[in-house]
Image: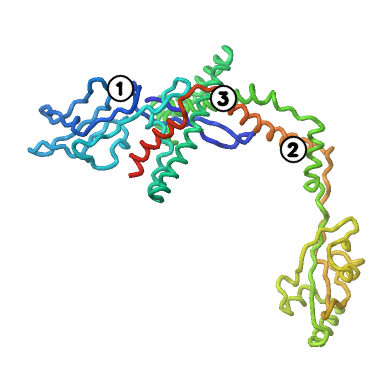
Amino acid sequence: MRPFRASIRAGWSIGVVIAAVAAAGCAHSKSGDARTVTIAEFAQPAAAEGAVAPTEVAGATETVQPVVATALGDAGGIDPYDFVEPDEFSDRAILRPTEPGETVIVDSLVGHVNGRPVFADDFLQPIEDRLLRAAEDTSGVERQQVFRAIINDWLQDVVTNELLLAEAEASLSSEQQMGLFAWLRMMYDEEIRRGGGTRSGAEQRRQKEGENLDEYLGGQKDIVLIHQLQQSKIQPRVIVSWRDIEREYKRRYAEFNPLATVTLARIRLNPVTQAALVDTVNARLAAGASFTEIAEELGYADGGVWETFEMGPGGITDIEVNALMKQALEGLEQGDTSEPFALGPAMLWLHVVEVQRPGARSIYEPAVQLGLRNTIRARRANTEWFRYVNSLLERGVYDELEDMAERLYQIAMDRYGT
C-alpha cells in the first residue's frame, strides 16, 4: 500500500488543526503523465484456462495494474462487466461499460509535493463521496463549478498538510526523533494487546473504525508532529500582557457588566366604551386578584406581558418610556401594579413582572483574567498559525497548484461526472 497523507480541519485550541488521513492506493512505481490502456490490450490470446496475463507496453511511464478477465463461451469475447479484481485494484478505474478500443485511466501521477508523488487515486478517494453526490445533484456548468471547488479546496489542504508535516519532521532533534519512535512503538504494542496479542487481531479491531493499523499509527504520528510544530514555531510568538487583558476587558465591558432589566405587563382599556371593565379591573385589583389572571380573562396572551427594558442607574424608572409611564412606575418593585392612569384615549395599568440585576464581574477576578488571557492567546495563535502556513506555501517545493488541480479535475470528471 502507498500511504498518502491528507488534511482534516478540526478544533484545536487555536481553531485550526491539520490532521492526517491515510487513503488506500496501488503499490506501483509510477512517474510521468497518466498511463492509459485500451480494453483491447487486455484481450490478448488467452491461456488454456482463459486468463489474460498482465500487459506492459513498451515505453510506458507506468505499470498497468494486473486485471484478470474471463472468457465468454465459445466466442471467446470479453465481458467488460466481468473483471475479477485483485484486492488493491480500485473499481473506480471502470465505472461504466467499456467498448473495444476505448481507453481507461488506471491511475495518474498529477504532481509532487516536497518530492512526494501525488496520485489521482489517492487524492480522490477521500472526496469521492462528495464528488458522487455533486454528480447526482448537479449538471452542466454547475457540476463543473462544484467539482472544481471541491478539488481546489482539497488540494490546498493536501499541499498545506504535506508541507507542514515535512517541516515538522525536519525540525525534530535526534532526541525528539527517538522519543517519537519510542512513543509509536508503545502505541503499536498497545494496539496489539487490545487485539488479543496478534497483529491480525489488531488489524480487525482497527478495520471496525474504517482504517488499518498502519493508517491509524500514521495519523497519530502526524497529530503529534503538528502539535510539536505549534509548540516550537507558534507558541513562542504569542505573548499576552496585562495591558492586552485590560484592553480586552474594556472591549467586552457590557458582557462582564450587564445592565439590569425590567419586564413590564400592561392592560389598556377605553374608559368611555369599556367603562364597566375599567371598574371591574380596579375592583379586582383592590381585592388582591392576580394581574396576570385579570389580563388573561380580558384576552391578553402571556398575562399581558409587554416588553423587557434595560434599566439605567436610576432603576425601574430609568427606562425608555414616556414620562407618564415613568411617573406611574415610581416606587414599584417586582410584583407590584401601578395605579390606573390616562394615556391618550386609553386607561392603562402597568405591572412589574420581573426585575433582573445580574452581578458585575471585575477584571481582578482570577477566572475573568484567565478567560480573557486564553481568548487573546487563541486569537493571536490562530493569526500566527495562518501566517506561518502562508510562509510555508510561499517557499514550499511543489508543482503548480493550478496545473495539478486541472489534471485532477479532468480525471474526476471522467470518473464521476459523466
- Do the numbered discs 2 and 3 sit on residues whose CB atoms are within 8 Å? no
Residue most toward the left?
Answer: 74
Residue located beneath label 2 in the image: 371
Instruction: Please report whichever mark, 2 or 3, sits nearer to the chain's N-terminal start.
Output: 2
Left or right position of 11 against 48:
right
Q: Which mark is residue 410?
A: none
At 41% across and 42% down in the image, what residue appears?
131
Quarter of the rendering containing residue 98: top left
Q: Which mark is residue 61?
A: 1
Residue located beneath label 3 in the image: 392
User: What amino acid does circle 2 point to?
Assistant: Gly
Q: Which image quarter holds the N terminus? A: top left
User: What amino acid does circle 3 point to?
Assistant: Leu
Badge 1: how crowded within 10 Å, few (<14), some, or many (20+)? some
Q: x%, y% of residue 187?
A: 51, 24
Quarter of the rendering containing residue 50: top left
Q: x%, y% of residue 36?
A: 28, 30
Q: Nearer the viewer, residue 196 or 51?
A: 51
Instruction: Please report whichever mark, 1 or 2, sits nearer to the chain's N-terminal start.
Output: 1
At 19% across and 30% down in the image, what residue appears?
41
Q: Is residue 205 visible?
A: no
Q: Nearer the viewer, residue 378 or 303?
A: 378
Viewer-side label of 1, 2 = 1
